[in-house]
Image (cartoon, grey):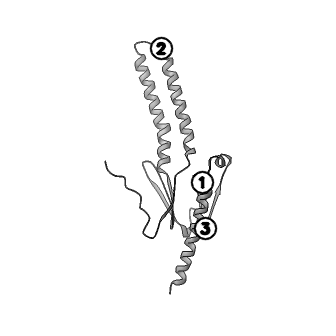
């Protein structure tokens, strides 16, 4: 089996500060649907009358239930596992996708504002939306379902300020 190739790692002058994936609450709907699929499949198996075709009918019900479980449970789990947000000392990296990978890197120097939003359920579960503003064509980036969003926002804000100070020092030291 071939080893998985990692996305480009941080450079020598760049260190990983925070690695996040969406909050586990994004999996709640998939788990509820999986429980319902299993309950309906068990009910269907019990309702099949005994007879010569009962074994085949039960096998069909089981196959349909397994297929439904794979679609309704595995796809959200894989999407959750393959979505990552990395905060380094120089950039914010976003990666997502199961089959086709999508990525976006935003240099910290380009970030103009960082804020968060938490609804009632988010407050209960400790998650929220991180809103990152950057000048340019994309403007505002909203990262949904971020665990410990207040900590992530404070860390990102601190790193943006440190990067600005570093750039200002470099500009002053230039001839």
Residue beneath disc 1: 148
Q: Earlier in the sequence, mark 2 or mark 1?
A: 2
C-beta proximity under 8 Å, tags 2 and 1: no
Asked if one can make out residue 135 in the rendered structure from this viewpoint, the answer is: no
Q: Is residue 122 above or below residue 170?
A: above
Q: Earlier in the sequence, mark 2 or mark 3?
A: 2
Pick out the residue farthest to the left.
1
Relative to 128, say whether 10 is above or below.
Answer: below
Q: Are marks 3 and 1 in contact (CB under 8 Å)?
A: no
State the image quarter where residue 165 is shown. bottom right
Residue wearing tag 2? 49
Q: Nearer the viewer, residue 19 or 47?
A: 19
Q: Tell me the number on the disc at residue 136.
A: none
Q: Is residue 94 above or below residue 170?
A: above
Task: Residue 93: give x, y in percent of width and height.
Answer: 50, 60
Looking at the rendered structure, the secondary structure element under dot 1 is loop
Residue 97 place in picture, x, y as percent: 46, 50
Q: Which mark is residue 112?
A: 3
Q: Is residue 74 left or right of residue 123?
A: left
Q: Residues within 10 Å of mark 1 (few under 14, many from 20)?
A: some
Identify the residue at the far right of this view: 120
Residue drawn at the location 46% of the way across and 55% of the way down: 102
Q: Is residue 11 left or right of residue 143?
A: left
Q: CA distance from mark 2 to mark 1?
A: 52 Å
- Sooner in the amino-acid sequence: mark 3 or mark 1: 3
Most extreme residue toward the bottom, as rendered?
Answer: 175
Q: CA distance from mark 2 to mark 3?
A: 66 Å
Q: Residue drawn at (44%, 64%), measured in percent from left and top?
A: 10
Per the image, label 3 sits on a secondary structure element best described as loop
Residue 138 at x, y = what percent? 56, 61
């Amino acid at each position: 089996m071939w080893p998985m190739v990692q996305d480009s790692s941080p450079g020598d002058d760049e260190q990983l500060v925070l690695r996040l994936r969406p909050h586990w609450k994004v999996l709640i709907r998939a788990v509820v649907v999986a429980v319902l699929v299993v309950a309906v499949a068990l009910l269907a198996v019990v309702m099949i009358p005994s007879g010569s075709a009962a074994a085949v009918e039960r096998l069909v019900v089981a196959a349909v239930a397994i297929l439904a479980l794979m679609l309704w449970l595995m796809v959200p789990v894989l999407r959750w596992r393959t979505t990552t947000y990395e905060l380094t000392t120089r950039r914010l990296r976003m990666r997502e996708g199961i089959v086709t990978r999508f990525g976006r890197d935003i240099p910290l120097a380009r970030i103009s504002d960082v804020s968060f939003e938490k609804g009632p359920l988010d407050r209960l579960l400790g998650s929220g939306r991180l809103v990152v503003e950057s000048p340019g064509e994309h403007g505002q980036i909203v990262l949904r379902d971020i665990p410990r969003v207040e900590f992530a926002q404070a860390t990102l804000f601190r790193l943006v300020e440190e990067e600005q100070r570093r750039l200002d020092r470099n500009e002053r030291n230039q001839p």
